[in-house]
Amino acid sequence: MTNNNQDTQYRIMLDTLTDQFIVTDSTQRVQATGNTIEQAFKQFESINQGA
């Protein structure tokens, strides 16, 4: 799934081997994981703000 949020395009994926959600930016330079989509996205936002 690909989404846009205030000029940031990101993808949300599920790693079925580890049951972890992964959120990456469109260039895949920034990546965050979490047990839920919300956790992964929250981590992504905090990392992306510093980038």
Image (spheres, grey):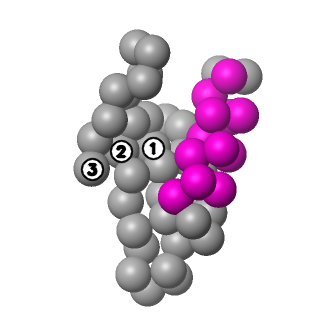
Quickly name the residue at label 2: 11
Disc 3 target residue:
1
Q: Distance between the residues labelled 2 and 3?
A: 6 Å
Which amino acid is tagged 3?
Answer: Met
Quarter-of-image position of residue 11: top left
> What type is the residue that disc 2 sits on?
Arg
User: Residue at 65% across / 44% down in the picture?
Assistant: 42
Give the quarter of the image for residue 10: top left
| Residue 28 % position (x, y) | 42, 40
Question: Of helix, strand and loop, which one carries label 3?
Answer: loop
Q: How many marks do you count on the picture? A: 3
List the single residue furthest toward the bottom.
17
Q: Is the magenta stretch mostly helix, strand or loop?
A: helix
In-image side of 35 versus 5 (left or right): right
Residue 24: x, y in percent? 45, 44
Task: Give yes or no for contact between labels 3 and 1 (Cβ–Cβ under 8 Å).
Answer: no
Residue 17 falls left or right of residue 41 = left
Which is nearer the N-term, disc 3 or disc 1?
Answer: 3
**Magenta-drawn segment:** 37-49
Residue type beneath disc 1: Thr
Give me the residue at 52% from left, 82% from top. Answer: 18
Q: Can residue 23 be seen in this view?
A: yes
Q: Is residue 42 above or below residue 35?
A: above
Which residue is painted at 32% across and 35% down in the image? 3
- Indicate the secondary structure of the residue bearing disc 1: strand
Task: From the image, tell me which residue sits under label 1.
Answer: 24
Q: Considering only order in the chain, which callout, 1 or 2, is on the residue closer to the N terminus?
A: 2
List x then y, in percent, for residue 48. Answer: 62, 28
Q: Is the C-beta separation of discs 2 and 1 under 8 Å?
A: yes
Label 2: how many residues lie within 10 Å, few (<14), some (14-19) or many (20+)? some
